[in-house]
Image (spheres, rainbow, N blue to C red):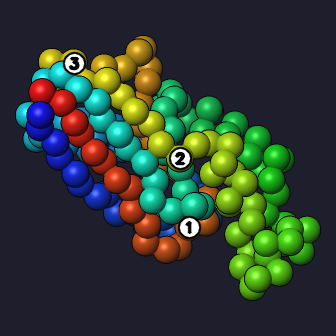
């Protein structure tokens, strides 16, 4: 069995943002030499997410609006977590909704996606350096 472990680092300057990491992950799959297997991609921080969806600007805007409606950042005193001196309780909740990781099949040394699927890093408490694990396993 072959395996590859790599870490991707991000520092999104805004509080929230989405970064398309599809091509980076695909290049790691190619580098791994795995022809048939699985690729795990997961956020290593509790205020960030990795998810799969369409790379469409309107959808990204809709996510932003919807997530802010579900867990508004302000007023920050509405969250008990923020009594610890943090102001990021909303980011924890947004991450929970968007998910921690994705697993994608590898077929013929390529990510095996459905139509329009792409991988994104979602940031909900930006301004700090954060990492994403990419783990490729297979034959």
Q: Is residue 11 above or below residue 134?
A: below
Q: Which residue is mark 3?
A: 107
* Image disc number at residue 100: 2
- The answer to which image quadrant residue 25 occupies is top left
Q: Is residue 32 left or right of residue 22?
A: left
Q: Is residue 89 above or below residue 110?
A: below
Q: Is residue 137 above or below residue 45?
A: above
Q: Is residue 42 left or right of residue 61?
A: left
- The answer to which image quadrant residue 124 occupies is bottom right
**Quick one: 101 or 61, which is closer to the camera?**
101
Q: Is residue 130 left or right of residue 29?
A: right
Front position among marks 3 and 1: 3
Res 35 seen here: yes
- Tell me where residue 92 appears, x and y as whole percent: 68, 59
Crowding near pointer 1: few (<14 within 10 Å), some, many (20+)?
many
| Secondary structure at numbered mark 3 | strand
């Amino acid at each position: 069995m072959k395996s590859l472990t790599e870490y991707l680092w991000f520092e999104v300057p805004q509080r929230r943002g989405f970064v398309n990491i599809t091509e980076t992950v695909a290049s790691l799959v190619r580098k791994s030499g795995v022809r048939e297997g699985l690729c795990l991609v997961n956020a290593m921080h509790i205020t960030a997410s990795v998810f799969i969806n369409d790379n469409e600007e309107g959808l990204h805007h809709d996510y932003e609006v919807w997530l802010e409606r579900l867990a508004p950042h302000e007023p920050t005193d509405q969250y008990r977590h923020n009594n610890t001196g943090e102001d990021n309780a909303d980011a924890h909740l947004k991450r929970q909704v968007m998910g921690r990781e994705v697993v994608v099949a590898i077929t013929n040394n390529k990510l095996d996606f459905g139509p329009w699927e792409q991988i994104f890093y979602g940031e909900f408490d930006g301004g700090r350096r954060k990492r994403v694990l990419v783990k490729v396993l297979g034959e």
